[in-house]
Image (tube, grey):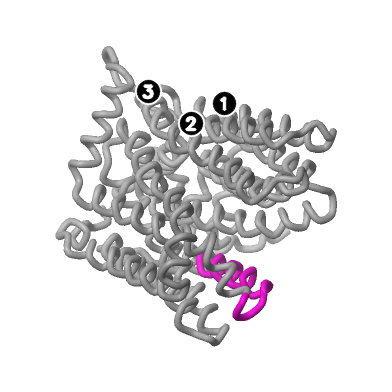
Amino acid sequence: MLTGRLVANSSLANYYSWVPLPASLRHRDFRLLVTGTATSALGNAITPVALAFAVLDLGGSATELGLVVAAFALAEVVTTLFGGVLGDRLPRKLMMEGSAAASAVTQLVMAVTLIGGWATIPLLGVVGALNGCVAALSQPSSRAMTRLTVPPDHLGSAVSVRALLQTSAATVGFVAGGLLVATVGSGWAIGVDAATYAVAALCYSRLRVEQATPEGERGSIVADLREGAREVLAHQWLWLLIGQALVYHLFYGGASGVLGPIVIGDEFGRSAWGLAMGTLMAGFVVGGLVCLRWRPRRSLYVGTVLLSLTALFPLAMALSDHLWVVMLGAFLHGFGLQVFDVFWDLAIQQNVDPDKLARVYSFDMVGSFVARPLGLALTGPIALAVGMQRWLVVVGVVMGASALLALRSAEVRGLTVRPAVPSDSAQLPHLPSEPPAPVSR
């Protein structure tokens, strides 16, 4: 039996030596993690499409649809901070597993009520808010978990692979959501999301990770939040770029969600907006592929420079009457944002204390998205007052300038990727560099 295991391990080593697999995917726990997160991303992209048509099919207005979506967004923002505290207090594996299982139940309830014809718009709002709460509880833990599933020298690969797989899954999910709603209805589409959460919960339950828990008596939740805030404020690059993300979502959220479909639809036709969104997602995927191989020493500086490319999409919508220019702007927007996101995540993973990591991620997520609902609400009135094209120019200038202004920080310019120190205990055995030779009989 022992001999059989040695032969199997040797065959596995030989296989890994010549299959072009990213280093992080050689680790079982990381494979389980990204399978769960990518599956959840697939389902999470289906639900917004299905939920929108579910509300409209129930006779809801645009205002009622906005209230249902806002209920989910508000619950998610409020709960994320507490998810960060719990992620540093409790085992992150438990947080992720429990959150995914609870999300599967809430989405199943929503699906059953829609399929059975018992759903109402207030019920969808309540269940949606509940789902936002339970899903948000695990998000900081999920992002902090990456560091626990790979050795330090494979962390860069892990961050890049995870971002690429989640983006690719979300791209497929957006398309699948429309197809499912058109063929089987909103209820069954949301049922698929429930199934993806169940798969994720199963993946997380099989993780074998060790998380160091703080010793001694813990303070209150408020004290833990205060400690997390101090950690954020201790790093200028961290709080500065969280502030930049707040500005980005405040301006771009409305430009994309409100003005984009109107401006592009009137100029090129409604199908052109879908093409623009698909091109933007293609930029995300290409950016993720680039980050698998490219990791500059001053990656945060490079990522922030490329983040300024996001300004090109609203500027192209405002100033160009050629569809290919708009598509190019959308692609570069997605490419620049994805590269920045990967390098930003890596900077946090390498430079924040492990026992504060979940709380820092919670402040990152809340700080980034807290102003987006306000931007969505104000974009329409402001654009009507000053003109849609003119406001899109303002949006593009603010997005580009805010990214470039962040480069004035010496910390943003000077933060470097830490050289990886191999962790012998966490790596696979030495692997030969050539494919295994055929065995002669």
Label 3 is placed on what type of residue? Arg
Range covered by the magenta-colored residues: 266-284
Q: Residue at x 51, y 69 (%)?
A: 283
Which residue lies most toward the top here?
Answer: 217
**Residue 137 tag number:** 2
- Residue under label 3, please give it: 89
Label 1 is placed on what type of residue? Gly
**Residue 302 tag number:** none
Labelled pair 2, 3 in contact (Cβ < 8 Å) = no
Query: In the figure, residue 55 lies in which quadrant?
Result: top right
Labelled pair 1, 2 in contact (Cβ < 8 Å) = yes
For the residue carrying disc 2, how many other residues have a C-alpha within 10 Å: few (<14), some (14-19), or many (20+)?
Answer: many
Residue 308 percent location from the top left of the image: 34, 69
Secondary element at image label 3: helix
From the viewer's perspective, is 47 left or right of 347?
Answer: right
- Residue under label 1, please give it: 98
Labelled pair 3, 1 in contact (Cβ < 8 Å) = no
Instruction: For residue 396, say whether it is visible.
Output: yes
Question: Does the magenta-highlighted stretch encompass residue 383?
Answer: no
Which residue lies most toward the left here?
Answer: 410
Label 2 is placed on what type of residue? Leu
Secondary element at image label 2: helix
For the residue carrying disc 1, how many other residues have a C-alpha within 10 Å: few (<14), some (14-19), or many (20+)?
Answer: some
Q: Disc 2 or 3, which lies upstream in sequence?
A: 3
Query: What separation in Å lies between label 2 and label 3 (alpha carbons)?
Result: 13 Å
